[in-house]
Image (cartoon, rainbow, N blue to C red):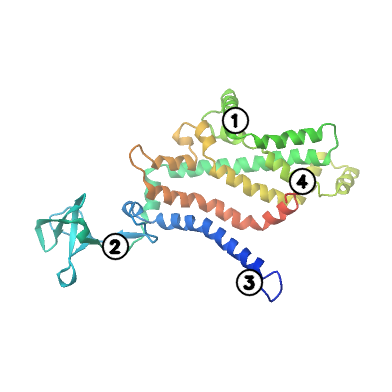
Amino acid sequence: MLAFLTRTRTKGRMDITDILSYLWLILGTLVIAIPIGWALLSSFKPPAEINSFPPTLLPYAAETVTVEGQDVPLPAYIMGEGEAARVVGLVRRIGLKATVIDPAQPDTRLSVPAEALRKQTEIAPQWSNYTEPLERFAFATYLHNSVFVTVVATVLTLLLNSMAAFALSKYRFRGSTTIFVLILSTLMLPLSVIMVPAFMVIVGLNLADNLWGVILSTVATPTGVFLLRQYMLTIPDDLIEAARVDAASEFRIYWKIILPLSAPALAVLAIFSVIWRWNDFLWPLIVLSSPKNYTLQLGLNAFQGQFTVEWHYILAMTVVALLPVTIIFLFLQKYVTEGVANSGVK
């Protein structure tokens, strides 16, 4: 690993291009990793710490002090300097004034300047940020819906796109190039352009507010057809001709020869498809209207109210939502370079 991380263009010597490359890679890594790391650590913070300024990196929580006559422990603050410093409990703070209680004198409330108080904190991860959404919201239902949509849509995407790519790469017929160009031209059409007609088709098929309406409208992708077609062009036609001589049907050739040989490209498309379906928010928001059919991304929106936003729950569930995609990518990442490099995508 060390040899891989320290290798240079010229053996035993580092020049300016190596230095610039490492600086660029380190900068890119930090740009990507810092927000993810902050979200992960902040998912363990209590609400007050998430909104505190200046922000903290670690999940600190305010220490508390028990005061006689108070129903709940109060946030602990230090008041005074040196030997006169003492721990007090904060009752409330209004503007620049704070009301505190000394545990030694629970019947006396003191009004002091807020700047005279120093908050006492400790590292205390809030595991309830992960457990409470499972109890208060139908998070398991959202997770099940997202898994169902992602798995089924990915399987159908691989099947349909590979069939189209097989026909466009291994069959010679008039208009094949025109069809391929038309498929690629749809890449220039954003969702906002086709959103209304696509939704009208879904309504016409009676698939509105149905998970199948989210799945079937997204399984045919021009990116998948292009990726697989370019890879299948590298498969020798002699294999197909030999199979036909042995009386193999066209579907058998596709299923037994083309698909196994296209495994790296299929793995790349599978990764892309999982990321697309799992992170999709706009199209499920348009198609689905019942909370029982919400996907995980729509379910996260339930933590945002009209007047308050429960950021500690949103961050915690966002981390949970990132885990499946991250795990899948870690297992299939070795296919990405091979599949893309052999698919004509330079």
Label 3 or label 2, whichever comes before in sequence order: 3
Q: Nearer the viewer, residue 156 or 283?
A: 283
Image point (59%, 43%), residue name: 276
Label 4 or label 2, whichever comes before in sequence order: 2
Residue flagged by tag 1: what amino acid is it? Val
Residue flagged by tag 3: what amino acid is it? Thr
Q: Label 1: which residue?
A: 193
Given this view, does label 3 or label 4 mark the residue nearer the observer? 3
Left or right, 246 with respect to 299, comes to right
Label 4 or label 1, whichever comes before in sequence order: 1
What is the CA distance from the residue labelled 1 to the residue labelled 2? 51 Å
Q: Label 4: which residue?
A: 230
Dividing the image into 4 quarters, which one contains the N terminus? bottom right
Helix, strand or loop at label 2? It is strand
Within 10 Å of disc 4 (Cα), the crowding (few <14, some 14-19, many 20+) is many
Q: Which mark is residue 6?
A: 3
Left or right, 42 with respect to 143, comes to left
Image point (82%, 31%), residue name: 175
